[in-house]
Structure formats: C-alpha cells, structure tokens
Amino acid sequence: MQITQDAHTVSGLMSHEEASSIVLAFAFGGALGDVKGKGIVYSHLSTDETTTNWIADLQDFELDQPVDRYLININRISRKVTSYSSITIPRVECEECVLAATGHQVKAITRSVDGSLSISYRVSIVEDGAIEYLIQLRFFADVTSMNLLMTFAAANTSSAVLPIPQVYMIPGELERPKKSRFGRQLTRFIHGSMAGSIYTTMTHVTRLAFVSNMARAYEAIWDLPIPQAPRLIGELRATSADPVDNQTITLHVGPDRQYGFTEPFTSVRDHFRAFVRFHLAAFEAQDGIEAYKQRYLSRVKAFVEAGMYNIPEIVETIPIVAQHCDLAPHNVILKATDVDSLMVSEIAAVIDWDFVAAAPFMSATRSIEMLFREFAQNDFGPEFPLAGELRKAFWDAIPKWKAWYEHEATVVYLGWYRFALFLKPAQPDDDIDEQELWNVFWAENVRVTEGMLRKYGGGVV
C-alpha cells in the first residue's frame, strides 16, 4: 500500500519513483529480515530538500500476526539509505499514555495485530481485569482529528448499527506532530474476530446477514451531518474548542492527503479529473507492464491530457457524504461469541478511521466490492458463489441509497470512477502466459479502458 504525501521536487535530486525502487531493493536485499515467502509493504512518509523517509515491512500475508515495521531514511543526493530503525512504542511510554489518559495503571502489554498504517499494543490494567486498551502508533493520521471524528460519528449514529471503539485523549498529543512524525491513539480494546480473516469461509446465510449489517453501517456514515455550504469534496477533518471535553466538535473539509491534492474540490467533475490524473501518473511509473503500456499508455494519456471536458454534468447531482475511506471486512470486528465464528454476523466495531472524506457516496465502490469478490492480485477477483444475492442483500437493507445506486448519475459516476481504478493494471507474476495475461489478468482493465475511450475518447485511437 502506498500513501502519497507532499514531496518536494528539486532539480538533480532523486524522484519519488526512484526512492520507492531503493526501498524495495533495500528490503528485498534482506536488510529487514528473511524475505522468503513474504511480500513487502511500504509507504512514503515525508520528504524535505535532501532526505526522503519511508516505512516498510515484510509480511507473510497468510499469517494474521504483528509485523516489524521500519523507518527508512534515504539521502536524495547520494541516493543511498542513510539509516533505518524499528518503529516501536517503549513500555514506559505506553504506561505514561494510559495513566495520563485514563488514570489506570498498566498490568501487561503485548503486541497486537496491526493495521496497514499503524503498529498496535494491547494493554491490560491493574484496576479491572475486564478492561483492556489498544494503543497505536499511527503513521499518517492526525490523531486528534481522528479521535474527534470517531467521537462525532459515535454521537450521531446508533451504536447497534455503527459501533465505534471509545477513544481517550492523551494529554499533549495535539502538540506531538510538531515533534514526531507519528501520532499515538488510545482506544478501548474490542474483543471479537476480524471479519476479514473469516469472511471467505462464512456460510452463505451468515454472509447475507453480514453484508446487510455492513450496508447499514455504510448508511449510518453516509447520513452523518457534514458541511454542505459550500459543497466540498476532500478530506474531512474535525476540531474542538476543548479536545478533552469534546462537547463542541466542528467538521471542515480540506485537501485530501491520500492523493496529495492541494485543495478541496467544489465540483465532482474537477475531482474526477484530478483523481484520474493521479492514477495516470501511477500508470506511467508502474514497472513490469511494458506490453500493456505499449498498447494503452499513449492513448490513455492523450485522452486525459485533452482535459476530459465531456464528463456528463449529471454527476454533479450525486450526494456528497461522509466516507470511512477503508470500510471493508479487514476493518470490522465481529462480536465475540461461544458460537462457531463462521456463523457470527453482528458487528462489534468499525476500526481504523485514519482517513475520512467528504466524497460522492459511491466513491466507496472498491471497498463495497470486497463483499462480493475474492481477493485477487489484479484487484478484480472472481465473484463469490451467489454474489447476486449478496449485492441484493446489501442494497435492499438501505432502500434510500439503493435508489441512488440505481440512479443515472451514479451509473455515469461509476463508469468514470472505475476508469480511474482500472487505468493502471497490476504487475503480473512472471509465470503467467500471454494468453492468460490479456484474457484474464488484464481483462477488466482492457474492458473498462476500451469502453471509456470508445464512449468519451473522441479522436483518441
């Protein structure tokens, strides 16, 4: 997973793409540990005039366990790794955070399963054996805003529909980003099973119930009261006059850090154009897809550079709503129970609110599709058996949003949004043959791209 942050471009200095290649070579070279059977997950953290900083780890994706994450610093002039260090929270720091935020004494601390943008510690306390906390070091989140957004969402929705872990403000955390690249978040630990680890093995009946619950969770977020004047698309942030009390929380829309945008958008079409250009840049930088680039890069680039002025105006009518930007089974905890976990469909918590946006409601399409498809390297895995019933259960659970899902504005929106998502194909494994490469692995990329160029490309050939 890559997160794009602001990166200074200085003539003669190493580019963002060069730095990512150095990170991969460094990690695959064994500096972070044995790479056999593992993949490398990395993200850009920050860049100044001479140094670029990255986070990387080695993961065995078949194992659901904590991983060691590292901060890697690269000199942009010499193009060499200058230092790297393990990212941790020392025990004494955990104890100080818990005591300051809750008044409780720490009894024991263990590493917990991490999110993709954090490291996590599970904490038990001396005073009450039934209470546990989760303290996380978050790499990109504005933790104060994140806590306030979670508090706001919890106050404006039903906990039975959208359960959110209770958050605890760590004194002084508001000032921490000025001194450290990372923010610390303290929440109540929620017992249960991660839906992402068991979803594919659930019975169909349980899966139907779960997707209905997920639909209602989406609806609860989409219905949150967010700023509407002016109508803006961007990252949703929260402030409070008293971050400890949280009685008065104000929401505002700013630039989207995920894509490195410098301002929010007032137009769905303008947001589309920036979103597509972001993915075009990733397409141009992608390695290992030379055959696909030869066939499509110049055509797609000509289409995008022409300005995409023929995006239908009807997309401006689509609702702009609050979005948890990664609401999928891997960020949902199911209720703990003595019953077989494969038959549990009730949501105990929605977690990892690192990025929240004000965005067109079906910008959540990629996450929603995870409910209907198997995971695949090409981001378009085969549908689950009876996927049609799963989709029906999802939309039937939220009739108001089903009507919008079927609306012409959404149909047009999804065509353009999917064009951005499938504009860049994934790099295939070395052992895939050419026929399978084009007819299976890249088939959806080809179908979506060709369809868009035929419909809106004009003179593009």
Image (cartoon, rainbow, N blue to C red):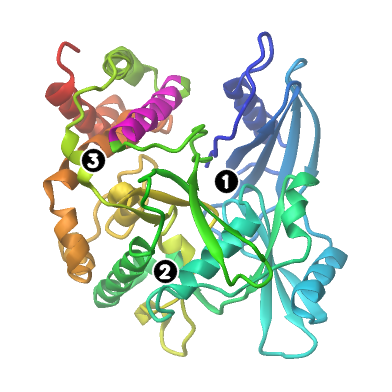
Please give the name of the residue rendered at 21% of the width and 29% of the height, measured from the top-left corner: 311
261 within the magenta span: no
Q: Which residue is mark 3?
A: 316
> From the viewer's perspective, is 420 left or right of 449?
right
Residue at image point 48% right, 34% down: 263
Q: CA distance from mark 3 to mark 2?
A: 38 Å
Q: Residues within 10 Å of mark 1 (few under 14, many from 20)?
A: few
Give the residue type that dot 2 points to. Ile
Is 293 on the left-hand or right-hand side of 316?
A: right
Which of labels 1 and 3 is toward the front? 3
The residue tagged 2 is 198
| Residue 323 lies in quadrant | bottom left
Considering the numbered disc 3 on the image, is that residue within a helix, a strand or a loop? helix
Number of the label disc, if any, that sits on residue 372? none
The label nearer to you, 3 versus 2, is 3
Compare residues 308 and 19 and report the one nearer the observer: 308
Label 3: few (<14), some or many (≥20) within 10 Å? some
Element type at mark 2? helix
Task: List the residue tagged with mark 1.
Answer: 37
Mark 3 belongs to which amino acid? Answer: Glu
Q: Is residue 282 magenta?
A: yes
Q: Is residue 85 above or below residue 158?
A: above
Among numbered discs 3 and 2, the one appearing first in the sequence: 2
**Range of the magenta residues?**
269-284
Proximity of marks 1 and 3: CB atoms separated by less than 8 Å: no
Magenta highlight: main SS: helix
- Residue 307 coordinates in the image, percent (x, y): 29, 18
